[in-house]
Amino acid sequence: MIEETGVVVAVEGDKAWIETQVKSTCGSCKASEACPTSTVAKAFSPKPEHVLIDVPCHLTVGQSVKIGISETALLYASMMVYILPLFSMIVFASLVSYFFQNIHELIVLTLSCFVALGAYWWVSANAKKPQNMKKYKPVFLGATKGAVMTQKHEIPTHKFTD
């Protein structure tokens, strides 16, 4: 389970909106003062993400929570987004070049890019289907009971049982 901490920003019945911050590794790098990539990362700070999740208990706004997503779902989604379009582009370019040997490379490249875009569109449409959306939805793992001191990147949690 891949875990992330967040803060409750709104509660709607048995669902809660959780705000998580996208973390950049540039802040922990020792060379960040002299690194131009770190300067660009600081200039374009990412916006917080808001996720609606089902919660089995009462939460209050401002409470810290831990949410998670399964590694299998994350790896499958990454494969679908990155590898499938690239693989379809390579296969299409290879097949077109093999069957149409006199075709210009620029035409093959352009058509292959359209095939990759089509694969991205298909992946997006497939992921938005209701039966697939629940596979990628984060789950509630726990919450803090009150104001507590924590170590860096830690959140004390207690398990809620149904």
Image: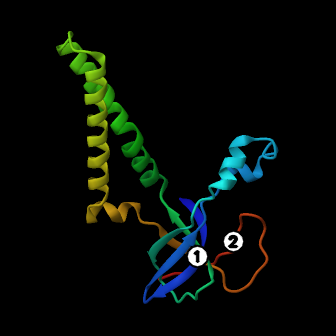
Kindly state the secondary structure of the residue where label 2 is placed.
loop
Question: Which amino acid does the dot numbered 2 rest on?
Answer: Ile
Packing grade of label 1 (10 A; few <14, some 14-19, many >=20) is: many
Q: Is residue 151 above or below residue 116?
A: below
Mark found first going from the N terminus, 1 or 2: 1
Packing grade of label 2 (10 A; few <14, some 14-19, many >=20) is: some
Q: Position of residue 57 (x, y in %)?
A: 51, 87
Q: Is residue 29 above or below residue 10?
A: above
Q: Nearer the viewer, residue 80 or 71?
A: 80
Question: Which amino acid does the dot numbered 1 rest on?
Answer: Gly
On the picture, is 12 further left or further right than 95? Answer: right
Q: Position of residue 79 (x, y in %)?
A: 40, 43
On the picture, is 25 further left or further right than 161? Answer: right
Asked if residue 104 shows in the view, the reply is yes
- For the point 37% across and 61% down, the residue is 135
On the picture, is 6 further left or further right than 72? Answer: right
Q: Which residue is mark 1?
A: 142
Asked if residue 159 shows in the view, the reply is no
Kindly state the secondary structure of the residue where label 1 is placed.
strand
Labels 1 & 2 near each other (Cβ < 8 A): yes
Q: Outermost residue toward the top?
A: 102
Measure the C-alpha gap from mark 1 to mark 2: 9 Å
Q: Which residue is mark 2?
A: 155
On the picture, is 161 further left or further right than 127? Answer: right
> Residue 153's quadrant in the figure?
bottom right
